[in-house]
Amino acid sequence: MRLVAAGLALGVVPFLGLAAFYESFLYLIFLWVALATSWNILSGYAGYFSFGHAAFFGAGAYTTAVLAGKLGWPFLWTLPLAAAVPALLGVALGAVIFRVRALRGELFAVLTLAVTFVVATIVLNTPIDGGPGVYLGAVAIPGLAPSPSGTFYLLALALALGTLWIARAIYRSRFGTGLFAIHDDEEVAEVMGVPTYRFKLAAFALSCALAGIAGGIHSVFVSYVTVGETFSGWTALYVILMSALGGTRHWLGPAIGAAAITTLLYVFTTSDYAVAGRAAVGLIFIVVILFLPQGILGKLARR
Amino acid sequence: MLPSATLLGQSVLSGVFAGALYGLLGLGLTLSWGLLRQINLAHFALVFLGAYLTYQLSSVAGVDPLLTLALVAPAFFVLGALLHWLLARFKVSPLNTLLVTFGFTVIIESLIQWIWSADFRRLESHYAGVKWKLGALFVPLPELLTLAIAAGLALSIWAMLRFTDLGRAMRATAEDAPIAAAFGVNEKLLALLLSGLCAALAAVAGACLALSHTLAPSQIYAWIGVVFAVVMIGGLGNPLGPLVAGIAIGVAEALTMAVTSPAWAPLVSFSLLIAVLLIRPDRF
Protein backbone atom coordinates (compact mmCIF):
# COMPACT_ATOMS: atom_id res chain seq x y z
CA MET A 1 0.00 0.00 0.00
CA ARG A 2 2.73 2.41 0.98
CA LEU A 3 4.65 1.56 -2.20
CA VAL A 4 1.58 2.38 -4.31
CA ALA A 5 1.10 5.67 -2.48
CA ALA A 6 4.78 6.52 -2.96
CA GLY A 7 4.41 5.65 -6.65
CA LEU A 8 1.38 7.90 -7.10
CA ALA A 9 3.02 10.78 -5.24
CA LEU A 10 6.29 10.50 -7.21
CA GLY A 11 4.41 9.83 -10.46
CA VAL A 12 3.06 13.39 -10.68
CA VAL A 13 6.56 14.94 -10.67
CA PRO A 14 7.00 15.01 -14.49
CA PHE A 15 3.75 16.97 -14.80
CA LEU A 16 4.92 19.77 -12.50
CA GLY A 17 7.07 21.38 -15.16
CA LEU A 18 10.37 21.04 -13.30
CA ALA A 19 13.66 21.49 -15.16
CA ALA A 20 14.81 18.34 -16.97
CA PHE A 21 17.86 18.29 -14.69
CA TYR A 22 15.80 17.21 -11.66
CA GLU A 23 14.02 14.49 -13.59
CA SER A 24 17.31 13.12 -14.91
CA PHE A 25 18.89 13.14 -11.46
CA LEU A 26 15.90 11.30 -9.96
CA TYR A 27 15.95 8.96 -12.97
CA LEU A 28 19.52 7.96 -12.04
CA ILE A 29 18.51 7.33 -8.44
CA PHE A 30 15.61 5.10 -9.50
CA LEU A 31 17.85 3.25 -11.95
CA TRP A 32 20.40 2.46 -9.24
CA VAL A 33 17.64 1.58 -6.76
CA ALA A 34 16.36 -0.98 -9.27
CA LEU A 35 19.86 -2.33 -9.97
CA ALA A 36 20.92 -2.60 -6.33
CA THR A 37 17.59 -4.09 -5.21
CA SER A 38 17.64 -6.64 -8.03
CA TRP A 39 21.22 -7.63 -7.14
CA ASN A 40 20.18 -8.10 -3.53
CA ILE A 41 17.52 -10.72 -4.34
CA LEU A 42 20.15 -13.37 -4.94
CA SER A 43 23.35 -11.88 -3.58
CA GLY A 44 22.03 -10.22 -0.42
CA TYR A 45 19.30 -12.66 0.60
CA ALA A 46 21.16 -15.87 -0.28
CA GLY A 47 24.69 -14.54 0.27
CA TYR A 48 26.00 -15.37 -3.21
CA PHE A 49 27.86 -12.12 -3.92
CA SER A 50 27.77 -11.68 -7.68
CA PHE A 51 30.39 -9.48 -9.34
CA GLY A 52 28.64 -10.05 -12.64
CA HIS A 53 25.63 -7.75 -12.44
CA ALA A 54 27.06 -5.70 -15.31
CA ALA A 55 26.83 -8.77 -17.57
CA PHE A 56 23.04 -8.94 -17.12
CA PHE A 57 22.54 -5.18 -17.15
CA GLY A 58 24.59 -5.16 -20.36
CA ALA A 59 22.74 -8.11 -21.90
CA GLY A 60 19.48 -6.19 -21.40
CA ALA A 61 20.99 -2.97 -22.75
CA TYR A 62 22.24 -4.67 -25.90
CA THR A 63 18.94 -6.53 -26.41
CA THR A 64 17.15 -3.20 -26.58
CA ALA A 65 19.98 -1.59 -28.54
CA VAL A 66 19.86 -4.25 -31.25
CA LEU A 67 16.06 -4.56 -31.43
CA ALA A 68 15.19 -0.87 -31.20
CA GLY A 69 18.37 0.71 -32.56
CA LYS A 70 19.24 -1.68 -35.39
CA LEU A 71 15.96 -3.47 -36.22
CA GLY A 72 13.58 -0.60 -35.56
CA TRP A 73 11.30 -2.25 -32.96
CA PRO A 74 9.24 0.14 -30.80
CA PHE A 75 11.22 0.82 -27.60
CA LEU A 76 8.70 -0.47 -25.04
CA TRP A 77 8.22 -3.74 -26.94
CA THR A 78 11.90 -4.54 -26.52
CA LEU A 79 11.75 -4.44 -22.73
CA PRO A 80 10.17 -7.91 -22.19
CA LEU A 81 13.01 -9.37 -24.24
CA ALA A 82 15.54 -7.20 -22.39
CA ALA A 83 14.32 -9.08 -19.33
CA ALA A 84 14.12 -12.51 -20.96
CA VAL A 85 17.60 -12.61 -22.53
CA PRO A 86 19.55 -11.90 -19.29
CA ALA A 87 17.20 -14.21 -17.35
CA LEU A 88 17.96 -17.06 -19.75
CA LEU A 89 21.66 -16.27 -19.52
CA GLY A 90 21.40 -16.34 -15.73
CA VAL A 91 19.47 -19.63 -15.71
CA ALA A 92 21.99 -21.24 -18.07
CA LEU A 93 24.89 -20.09 -15.89
CA GLY A 94 23.15 -20.91 -12.63
CA ALA A 95 22.19 -24.38 -13.84
CA VAL A 96 25.91 -25.15 -14.07
CA ILE A 97 27.36 -23.04 -11.23
CA PHE A 98 24.81 -23.88 -8.53
CA ARG A 99 25.41 -27.60 -9.01
CA VAL A 100 29.05 -27.20 -7.96
CA ARG A 101 28.96 -26.98 -4.20
CA ALA A 102 32.34 -25.33 -3.68
CA LEU A 103 31.51 -22.34 -5.88
CA ARG A 104 30.41 -19.88 -3.23
CA GLY A 105 31.88 -16.86 -1.52
CA GLU A 106 34.94 -15.48 -3.26
CA LEU A 107 34.92 -18.19 -5.95
CA PHE A 108 31.38 -17.28 -7.04
CA ALA A 109 32.49 -13.63 -7.05
CA VAL A 110 35.49 -14.29 -9.30
CA LEU A 111 33.49 -16.57 -11.57
CA THR A 112 30.73 -14.03 -12.16
CA LEU A 113 33.35 -11.33 -12.80
CA ALA A 114 34.94 -13.57 -15.45
CA VAL A 115 31.50 -14.12 -17.01
CA THR A 116 31.18 -10.33 -17.40
CA PHE A 117 34.44 -10.19 -19.37
CA VAL A 118 33.45 -13.16 -21.54
CA VAL A 119 30.03 -11.71 -22.40
CA ALA A 120 31.61 -8.31 -23.10
CA THR A 121 34.24 -9.84 -25.42
CA ILE A 122 31.60 -11.79 -27.33
CA VAL A 123 29.36 -8.72 -27.75
CA LEU A 124 32.35 -6.64 -28.87
CA ASN A 125 33.49 -9.09 -31.54
CA THR A 126 30.18 -10.19 -33.04
CA PRO A 127 27.65 -8.19 -35.07
CA ILE A 128 25.74 -7.50 -31.80
CA ASP A 129 28.08 -4.52 -31.46
CA GLY A 130 31.15 -5.18 -33.58
CA GLY A 131 33.23 -2.42 -32.02
CA PRO A 132 31.83 1.03 -32.83
CA GLY A 133 28.92 0.94 -30.35
CA VAL A 134 25.22 1.24 -31.16
CA TYR A 135 23.39 4.54 -31.67
CA LEU A 136 19.85 4.75 -30.36
CA GLY A 137 19.32 8.42 -31.17
CA ALA A 138 16.63 7.65 -33.74
CA VAL A 139 14.52 5.50 -31.38
CA ALA A 140 11.10 7.07 -30.80
CA ILE A 141 10.50 7.79 -27.12
CA PRO A 142 6.88 7.13 -26.09
CA GLY A 143 5.05 10.20 -24.80
CA LEU A 144 4.17 9.00 -21.30
CA ALA A 145 5.00 12.44 -19.89
CA PRO A 146 5.24 15.97 -21.34
CA SER A 147 9.01 15.62 -21.95
CA PRO A 148 11.41 12.75 -22.85
CA SER A 149 13.22 13.13 -19.52
CA GLY A 150 9.81 12.85 -17.83
CA THR A 151 9.14 9.62 -19.71
CA PHE A 152 12.44 8.10 -18.58
CA TYR A 153 11.68 9.28 -15.07
CA LEU A 154 8.35 7.42 -15.10
CA LEU A 155 9.85 4.26 -16.60
CA ALA A 156 12.65 4.14 -14.03
CA LEU A 157 10.21 4.94 -11.23
CA ALA A 158 7.94 2.09 -12.30
CA LEU A 159 10.90 -0.30 -12.51
CA ALA A 160 12.29 0.76 -9.13
CA LEU A 161 8.92 0.37 -7.40
CA GLY A 162 8.23 -2.90 -9.19
CA THR A 163 11.62 -4.26 -8.14
CA LEU A 164 11.11 -3.12 -4.56
CA TRP A 165 7.66 -4.72 -4.54
CA ILE A 166 9.09 -8.03 -5.77
CA ALA A 167 11.99 -7.85 -3.30
CA ARG A 168 9.55 -7.20 -0.44
CA ALA A 169 7.17 -9.97 -1.51
CA ILE A 170 10.07 -12.42 -1.58
CA TYR A 171 11.37 -11.12 1.75
CA ARG A 172 8.06 -11.94 3.42
CA SER A 173 7.49 -15.28 1.70
CA ARG A 174 8.66 -18.84 2.26
CA PHE A 175 10.93 -18.30 -0.75
CA GLY A 176 12.68 -15.45 1.05
CA THR A 177 12.99 -17.40 4.29
CA GLY A 178 14.60 -20.18 2.27
CA LEU A 179 17.09 -17.77 0.68
CA PHE A 180 18.08 -16.38 4.08
CA ALA A 181 18.52 -19.95 5.34
CA ILE A 182 20.90 -20.57 2.42
CA HIS A 183 22.83 -17.46 3.46
CA ASP A 184 23.16 -18.59 7.06
CA ASP A 185 24.10 -22.22 6.42
CA GLU A 186 23.40 -23.95 3.15
CA GLU A 187 23.85 -27.51 4.49
CA VAL A 188 21.42 -26.90 7.34
CA ALA A 189 18.95 -25.28 4.93
CA GLU A 190 19.06 -28.35 2.74
CA VAL A 191 18.48 -30.68 5.68
CA MET A 192 15.50 -28.55 6.74
CA GLY A 193 13.99 -29.18 3.31
CA VAL A 194 14.76 -25.93 1.48
CA PRO A 195 15.09 -26.75 -2.24
CA THR A 196 18.35 -24.76 -2.37
CA TYR A 197 19.18 -25.38 -6.03
CA ARG A 198 15.77 -24.29 -7.33
CA PHE A 199 15.60 -21.30 -4.96
CA LYS A 200 19.02 -20.02 -6.00
CA LEU A 201 18.20 -20.49 -9.66
CA ALA A 202 14.86 -18.68 -9.37
CA ALA A 203 16.40 -15.82 -7.40
CA PHE A 204 19.23 -15.49 -9.95
CA ALA A 205 16.78 -15.47 -12.89
CA LEU A 206 14.65 -12.75 -11.28
CA SER A 207 17.71 -10.72 -10.35
CA CYS A 208 19.05 -10.92 -13.93
CA ALA A 209 15.71 -10.13 -15.55
CA LEU A 210 15.23 -6.96 -13.49
CA ALA A 211 18.81 -5.84 -14.17
CA GLY A 212 18.14 -6.46 -17.87
CA ILE A 213 15.09 -4.18 -17.92
CA ALA A 214 17.18 -1.50 -16.24
CA GLY A 215 19.78 -1.98 -18.98
CA GLY A 216 17.14 -1.75 -21.70
CA ILE A 217 15.75 1.54 -20.36
CA HIS A 218 19.19 2.99 -19.77
CA SER A 219 20.44 2.19 -23.28
CA VAL A 220 17.76 4.45 -24.78
CA PHE A 221 18.33 7.08 -22.05
CA VAL A 222 22.04 7.41 -22.92
CA SER A 223 21.13 6.90 -26.65
CA TYR A 224 24.57 5.46 -27.44
CA VAL A 225 25.86 2.21 -25.94
CA THR A 226 29.45 0.93 -26.01
CA VAL A 227 30.85 -2.31 -24.64
CA GLY A 228 33.36 -0.52 -22.40
CA GLU A 229 30.72 1.59 -20.66
CA THR A 230 27.93 -0.99 -20.56
CA PHE A 231 29.94 -3.91 -19.17
CA SER A 232 32.09 -1.81 -16.85
CA GLY A 233 33.13 -3.63 -13.68
CA TRP A 234 32.14 -0.50 -11.77
CA THR A 235 28.45 -1.32 -12.17
CA ALA A 236 28.81 -4.47 -10.08
CA LEU A 237 31.00 -2.74 -7.51
CA TYR A 238 28.65 0.23 -7.08
CA VAL A 239 25.71 -2.13 -6.68
CA ILE A 240 27.59 -4.12 -4.04
CA LEU A 241 28.61 -0.97 -2.20
CA MET A 242 25.06 0.43 -2.25
CA SER A 243 23.58 -2.79 -0.92
CA ALA A 244 26.25 -3.24 1.73
CA LEU A 245 25.85 0.35 2.87
CA GLY A 246 22.07 0.15 3.15
CA GLY A 247 22.00 -3.40 4.48
CA THR A 248 21.71 -6.62 2.47
CA ARG A 249 19.40 -8.38 4.92
CA HIS A 250 16.46 -6.07 4.39
CA TRP A 251 14.46 -5.50 1.21
CA LEU A 252 14.74 -1.71 1.54
CA GLY A 253 18.48 -1.63 2.38
CA PRO A 254 19.91 -1.48 -1.17
CA ALA A 255 17.47 1.31 -2.12
CA ILE A 256 18.71 3.47 0.76
CA GLY A 257 22.33 2.81 -0.18
CA ALA A 258 21.61 3.50 -3.85
CA ALA A 259 20.02 6.87 -3.13
CA ALA A 260 22.92 7.86 -0.86
CA ILE A 261 25.76 6.78 -3.18
CA THR A 262 24.12 8.14 -6.35
CA THR A 263 23.61 11.51 -4.70
CA LEU A 264 27.18 11.55 -3.41
CA LEU A 265 28.66 10.69 -6.82
CA TYR A 266 26.42 13.22 -8.52
CA VAL A 267 27.51 16.00 -6.19
CA PHE A 268 31.19 15.17 -6.69
CA THR A 269 31.10 14.71 -10.47
CA THR A 270 29.09 17.87 -11.14
CA SER A 271 31.47 19.91 -9.01
CA ASP A 272 35.18 19.82 -9.89
CA TYR A 273 36.09 17.08 -7.45
CA ALA A 274 35.43 13.89 -9.43
CA VAL A 275 38.73 12.41 -8.18
CA ALA A 276 37.79 13.16 -4.57
CA GLY A 277 34.42 11.50 -5.22
CA ARG A 278 36.19 8.33 -6.30
CA ALA A 279 38.36 8.39 -3.20
CA ALA A 280 35.26 8.89 -1.06
CA VAL A 281 33.68 5.80 -2.63
CA GLY A 282 36.81 3.83 -1.76
CA LEU A 283 36.74 5.08 1.80
CA ILE A 284 33.05 4.23 2.21
CA PHE A 285 33.78 0.71 0.97
CA ILE A 286 36.39 0.23 3.70
CA VAL A 287 34.33 1.81 6.47
CA VAL A 288 31.17 -0.10 5.61
CA ILE A 289 32.86 -3.52 5.49
CA LEU A 290 34.92 -2.95 8.65
CA PHE A 291 32.50 -1.03 10.86
CA LEU A 292 29.01 -1.49 9.40
CA PRO A 293 28.85 -5.13 8.24
CA GLN A 294 25.06 -5.19 8.62
CA GLY A 295 24.55 -1.90 6.81
CA ILE A 296 22.55 1.12 7.96
CA LEU A 297 19.25 -0.76 8.25
CA GLY A 298 20.89 -3.69 10.03
CA LYS A 299 22.36 -1.26 12.55
CA LEU A 300 19.01 0.47 13.11
CA ALA A 301 17.06 -2.80 13.33
CA ARG A 302 19.30 -4.13 16.08
CA ARG A 303 18.56 -1.24 18.41
CA MET B 1 45.26 -17.23 -43.93
CA LEU B 2 48.11 -18.09 -41.60
CA PRO B 3 50.65 -15.42 -40.61
CA SER B 4 54.33 -15.90 -41.49
CA ALA B 5 56.73 -17.90 -39.33
CA THR B 6 58.60 -14.77 -38.22
CA LEU B 7 55.38 -13.10 -37.14
CA LEU B 8 54.33 -16.22 -35.25
CA GLY B 9 57.76 -16.45 -33.64
CA GLN B 10 57.64 -12.81 -32.59
CA SER B 11 54.09 -13.38 -31.27
CA VAL B 12 55.20 -16.31 -29.13
CA LEU B 13 58.12 -14.28 -27.80
CA SER B 14 55.94 -11.30 -26.94
CA GLY B 15 53.51 -13.74 -25.32
CA VAL B 16 56.29 -15.12 -23.13
CA PHE B 17 57.25 -11.59 -22.09
CA ALA B 18 53.64 -10.61 -21.40
CA GLY B 19 53.30 -13.81 -19.39
CA ALA B 20 56.40 -12.99 -17.35
CA LEU B 21 54.78 -9.74 -16.25
CA TYR B 22 51.50 -11.55 -15.48
CA GLY B 23 53.50 -13.97 -13.39
CA LEU B 24 55.39 -11.22 -11.58
CA LEU B 25 52.15 -9.36 -10.82
CA GLY B 26 50.50 -12.58 -9.72
CA LEU B 27 53.31 -13.70 -7.40
CA GLY B 28 52.37 -11.48 -4.46
CA LEU B 29 48.69 -12.10 -5.08
CA THR B 30 48.95 -15.88 -5.02
CA LEU B 31 50.99 -15.86 -1.79
CA SER B 32 48.56 -13.66 0.12
CA TRP B 33 45.53 -15.50 -1.27
CA GLY B 34 46.89 -19.00 -0.80
CA LEU B 35 48.77 -18.61 2.48
CA LEU B 36 46.90 -15.78 4.24
CA ARG B 37 43.42 -16.23 2.67
CA GLN B 38 43.45 -12.55 1.74
CA ILE B 39 42.45 -11.58 -1.78
CA ASN B 40 44.42 -8.40 -2.10
CA LEU B 41 43.05 -6.27 -4.94
CA ALA B 42 45.17 -3.40 -3.64
CA HIS B 43 48.16 -5.36 -4.94
CA PHE B 44 47.40 -3.93 -8.39
CA ALA B 45 47.21 -0.40 -7.05
CA LEU B 46 50.51 -0.89 -5.19
CA VAL B 47 52.14 -2.15 -8.40
CA PHE B 48 51.09 1.06 -10.13
CA LEU B 49 52.08 3.24 -7.20
CA GLY B 50 55.49 1.53 -7.31
CA ALA B 51 55.70 2.09 -11.06
CA TYR B 52 54.93 5.80 -10.65
CA LEU B 53 57.48 6.13 -7.84
CA THR B 54 60.08 4.48 -10.07
CA TYR B 55 59.09 6.88 -12.84
CA GLN B 56 59.39 9.87 -10.51
CA LEU B 57 62.69 8.93 -8.85
CA SER B 58 64.21 7.89 -12.14
CA SER B 59 63.10 10.68 -14.48
CA VAL B 60 63.27 13.56 -11.97
CA ALA B 61 66.01 12.53 -9.52
CA GLY B 62 67.93 10.55 -12.14
CA VAL B 63 68.21 7.31 -10.16
CA ASP B 64 68.59 4.08 -12.14
CA PRO B 65 65.05 2.57 -12.40
CA LEU B 66 66.06 -0.71 -10.78
CA LEU B 67 67.98 1.01 -7.97
CA THR B 68 64.81 2.90 -6.97
CA LEU B 69 63.67 -0.40 -5.50
CA ALA B 70 66.19 0.00 -2.69
CA LEU B 71 63.93 2.79 -1.44
CA VAL B 72 60.48 1.72 -2.66
CA ALA B 73 60.54 -1.97 -1.74
CA PRO B 74 61.24 -1.50 2.01
CA ALA B 75 58.60 1.24 2.19
CA PHE B 76 56.08 -1.07 0.56
CA PHE B 77 57.06 -3.86 2.95
CA VAL B 78 55.82 -1.67 5.79
CA LEU B 79 52.60 -0.82 3.90
CA GLY B 80 51.92 -4.51 3.31
CA ALA B 81 52.46 -5.37 6.97
CA LEU B 82 50.11 -2.53 7.97
CA LEU B 83 47.42 -3.79 5.59
CA HIS B 84 47.65 -7.25 7.10
CA TRP B 85 47.46 -5.85 10.59
CA LEU B 86 44.24 -4.03 9.67
CA LEU B 87 42.62 -7.05 7.99
CA ALA B 88 43.62 -9.34 10.87
CA ARG B 89 42.48 -6.86 13.50
CA PHE B 90 38.94 -6.86 12.05
CA LYS B 91 38.98 -10.60 11.17
CA VAL B 92 37.85 -9.83 7.61
CA SER B 93 36.50 -12.83 5.66
CA PRO B 94 38.15 -13.74 2.32
CA LEU B 95 35.22 -12.31 0.31
CA ASN B 96 35.30 -9.10 2.33
CA THR B 97 39.07 -8.71 1.93
CA LEU B 98 38.27 -8.42 -1.77
CA LEU B 99 35.90 -5.54 -1.04
CA VAL B 100 38.06 -3.75 1.54
CA THR B 101 41.17 -3.90 -0.63
CA PHE B 102 39.10 -2.69 -3.56
CA GLY B 103 38.40 0.38 -1.44
CA PHE B 104 42.15 0.88 -0.97
CA THR B 105 42.66 0.39 -4.72
CA VAL B 106 40.27 3.21 -5.52
CA ILE B 107 41.90 5.49 -2.94
CA ILE B 108 45.41 4.80 -4.30
CA GLU B 109 44.13 5.32 -7.86
CA SER B 110 42.71 8.70 -6.87
CA LEU B 111 45.99 9.58 -5.17
CA ILE B 112 47.97 8.68 -8.31
CA GLN B 113 45.60 10.69 -10.49
CA TRP B 114 45.86 13.63 -8.12
CA ILE B 115 49.68 13.65 -8.11
CA TRP B 116 50.52 12.54 -11.66
CA SER B 117 47.22 13.40 -13.48
CA ALA B 118 45.25 11.00 -15.66
CA ASP B 119 47.61 11.51 -18.63
CA PHE B 120 49.88 8.76 -19.90
CA ARG B 121 53.42 8.77 -18.49
CA ARG B 122 56.36 7.04 -20.07
CA LEU B 123 59.67 6.41 -18.35
CA GLU B 124 62.61 7.18 -20.67
CA SER B 125 65.43 5.02 -19.33
CA HIS B 126 68.66 3.80 -20.85
CA TYR B 127 67.17 0.29 -20.79
CA ALA B 128 64.30 1.19 -23.06
CA GLY B 129 66.16 1.53 -26.35
CA VAL B 130 68.30 -1.61 -26.06
CA LYS B 131 67.21 -4.42 -28.37
CA TRP B 132 69.01 -7.57 -29.43
CA LYS B 133 68.47 -9.52 -32.58
CA LEU B 134 68.05 -13.26 -32.16
CA GLY B 135 67.82 -14.69 -35.65
CA ALA B 136 64.87 -12.92 -37.23
CA LEU B 137 63.41 -11.98 -33.82
CA PHE B 138 63.82 -8.82 -31.75
CA VAL B 139 64.44 -9.18 -28.00
CA PRO B 140 63.93 -5.94 -26.04
CA LEU B 141 66.00 -5.58 -22.87
CA PRO B 142 63.27 -4.33 -20.44
CA GLU B 143 61.09 -7.34 -21.20
CA LEU B 144 64.03 -9.71 -20.88
CA LEU B 145 64.89 -8.18 -17.50
CA THR B 146 61.28 -8.66 -16.40
CA LEU B 147 61.39 -12.32 -17.39
CA ALA B 148 64.68 -12.85 -15.53
CA ILE B 149 63.40 -11.09 -12.40
CA ALA B 150 60.06 -12.92 -12.49
CA ALA B 151 61.73 -16.31 -12.85
CA GLY B 152 64.42 -15.52 -10.25
CA LEU B 153 61.89 -14.34 -7.64
CA ALA B 154 59.45 -17.18 -8.25
CA LEU B 155 62.21 -19.77 -7.90
CA SER B 156 63.75 -18.23 -4.80
CA ILE B 157 60.39 -17.92 -3.04
CA TRP B 158 59.56 -21.49 -4.02
CA ALA B 159 62.88 -22.63 -2.56
CA MET B 160 62.36 -20.47 0.54
CA LEU B 161 58.92 -21.99 1.21
CA ARG B 162 60.18 -25.49 0.59
CA PHE B 163 63.60 -25.68 2.17
CA THR B 164 63.87 -23.10 4.96
CA ASP B 165 62.35 -23.29 8.43
CA LEU B 166 60.68 -19.94 7.86
CA GLY B 167 59.03 -21.22 4.67
CA ARG B 168 57.95 -24.48 6.28
CA ALA B 169 56.42 -22.56 9.15
CA MET B 170 54.51 -20.36 6.70
CA ARG B 171 53.09 -23.35 4.85
CA ALA B 172 52.23 -25.11 8.11
CA THR B 173 50.34 -22.05 9.32
CA ALA B 174 48.37 -21.88 6.08
CA GLU B 175 47.56 -25.57 6.40
CA ASP B 176 46.43 -25.53 10.03
CA ALA B 177 47.11 -22.42 12.10
CA PRO B 178 46.25 -23.78 15.61
CA ILE B 179 48.45 -26.88 15.19
CA ALA B 180 51.32 -24.80 13.81
CA ALA B 181 50.95 -22.43 16.78
CA ALA B 182 51.06 -25.40 19.14
CA PHE B 183 54.43 -26.31 17.63
CA GLY B 184 55.73 -22.87 18.51
CA VAL B 185 55.18 -21.05 15.23
CA ASN B 186 54.64 -17.35 15.77
CA GLU B 187 51.71 -17.12 13.41
CA LYS B 188 51.09 -13.39 13.69
CA LEU B 189 54.68 -12.37 13.01
CA LEU B 190 54.91 -14.74 10.03
CA ALA B 191 51.74 -13.33 8.51
CA LEU B 192 53.04 -9.79 8.87
CA LEU B 193 56.33 -10.79 7.21
CA LEU B 194 54.54 -12.55 4.38
CA SER B 195 52.16 -9.67 3.77
CA GLY B 196 55.10 -7.27 3.75
CA LEU B 197 56.92 -9.52 1.29
CA CYS B 198 53.88 -9.51 -1.02
CA ALA B 199 53.80 -5.71 -1.05
CA ALA B 200 57.57 -5.56 -1.69
CA LEU B 201 56.96 -7.89 -4.64
CA ALA B 202 54.39 -5.37 -5.88
CA ALA B 203 57.15 -2.74 -5.83
CA VAL B 204 59.39 -4.97 -7.96
CA ALA B 205 56.56 -5.66 -10.40
CA GLY B 206 55.92 -1.91 -10.51
CA ALA B 207 59.53 -1.12 -11.47
CA CYS B 208 59.36 -3.71 -14.27
CA LEU B 209 56.02 -2.31 -15.42
CA ALA B 210 57.48 1.20 -15.56
CA LEU B 211 60.40 -0.05 -17.67
CA SER B 212 58.26 -1.62 -20.36
CA HIS B 213 54.82 0.02 -20.26
CA THR B 214 53.17 3.42 -20.53
CA LEU B 215 51.46 4.32 -17.25
CA ALA B 216 47.98 5.72 -16.61
CA PRO B 217 45.95 5.41 -13.40
CA SER B 218 42.97 3.82 -15.18
CA GLN B 219 45.27 1.00 -16.36
CA ILE B 220 45.20 -0.46 -12.82
CA TYR B 221 41.93 -2.20 -13.60
CA ALA B 222 43.06 -3.51 -16.98
CA TRP B 223 45.35 -6.06 -15.31
CA ILE B 224 43.02 -7.43 -12.65
CA GLY B 225 41.09 -9.91 -14.80
CA VAL B 226 43.94 -11.64 -16.52
CA VAL B 227 46.20 -11.75 -13.44
CA PHE B 228 43.35 -13.25 -11.39
CA ALA B 229 43.00 -15.91 -14.06
CA VAL B 230 46.74 -16.59 -14.01
CA VAL B 231 46.82 -16.83 -10.21
CA MET B 232 43.86 -19.21 -10.00
CA ILE B 233 44.94 -21.40 -12.90
CA GLY B 234 48.45 -21.59 -11.42
CA GLY B 235 47.10 -22.79 -8.08
CA LEU B 236 46.74 -20.55 -5.02
CA GLY B 237 49.83 -20.23 -2.85
CA ASN B 238 52.12 -21.84 -5.43
CA PRO B 239 54.91 -19.34 -6.24
CA LEU B 240 55.75 -21.01 -9.55
CA GLY B 241 52.09 -21.21 -10.62
CA PRO B 242 51.52 -17.63 -11.83
CA LEU B 243 54.68 -17.62 -13.94
CA VAL B 244 53.93 -20.93 -15.65
CA ALA B 245 50.23 -20.16 -16.15
CA GLY B 246 51.14 -16.57 -17.10
CA ILE B 247 53.47 -17.62 -19.88
CA ALA B 248 50.98 -20.21 -21.15
CA ILE B 249 48.20 -17.63 -21.23
CA GLY B 250 50.46 -14.91 -22.62
CA VAL B 251 51.48 -17.12 -25.54
CA ALA B 252 47.89 -18.29 -26.12
CA GLU B 253 46.73 -14.65 -26.16
CA ALA B 254 49.52 -13.55 -28.50
CA LEU B 255 48.69 -16.36 -30.93
CA THR B 256 44.98 -15.53 -30.72
CA MET B 257 45.83 -11.93 -31.57
CA ALA B 258 48.04 -12.97 -34.50
CA VAL B 259 45.51 -15.39 -35.95
CA THR B 260 42.20 -13.62 -35.20
CA SER B 261 41.67 -10.04 -34.05
CA PRO B 262 43.34 -8.58 -30.90
CA ALA B 263 39.93 -7.95 -29.37
CA TRP B 264 39.32 -11.69 -28.93
CA ALA B 265 42.38 -12.10 -26.65
CA PRO B 266 40.58 -11.63 -23.28
CA LEU B 267 38.41 -14.64 -24.06
CA VAL B 268 41.44 -16.97 -23.64
CA SER B 269 42.18 -16.28 -19.99
CA PHE B 270 38.59 -15.91 -18.84
CA SER B 271 37.26 -19.05 -20.47
CA LEU B 272 40.22 -20.94 -18.99
CA LEU B 273 39.47 -19.43 -15.58
CA ILE B 274 35.80 -20.39 -15.78
CA ALA B 275 36.74 -23.89 -16.91
CA VAL B 276 39.20 -24.33 -14.01
CA LEU B 277 36.63 -23.08 -11.50
CA LEU B 278 33.90 -25.39 -12.80
CA ILE B 279 36.07 -28.48 -13.19
CA ARG B 280 38.35 -28.25 -10.15
CA PRO B 281 36.66 -25.96 -7.58
CA ASP B 282 38.09 -28.09 -4.75
CA ARG B 283 41.57 -26.80 -5.58
CA PHE B 284 40.81 -23.42 -4.11
Image (tube, coloured by chain):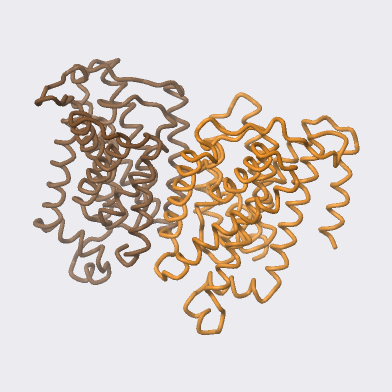
Splitting the image into 4 quarters, where does residue A174 fall?
Answer: bottom right
Q: Position of residue B207 (x, y in %)?
A: 25, 30
Q: Residue at 66%, 37% (x, y): give it.
A: A69
The C terminus of chain B sits in image quarter = bottom left
Question: Is residue B198 something that shows in the picture?
Answer: no
Q: Using residue B67 as the reference point, say whether residue A163 is left or right of it.
A: right
Q: Please count the marks in the image.
A: 0
Q: Most extreme residue toward the front, as rendered?
A: B1
Chain letter corresponding to the colour orange = A
Kindly identify the residue that appears in the image at 38 percent across and 42 percent down.
B266
User: In the picture shown, does residue B177 fall above or below B226?
Assistant: below
Residue B37, image quadrant: bottom left
Chain (brown): B
Residue A19 sits in quarter: top right
Q: Name the spot of residue B144 as percent of width and height, x first.
A: 16, 30
The percent coordinates of residue B62 (x first, y second) are 23, 15
Q: Is residue B185 above or below residue A23?
A: below
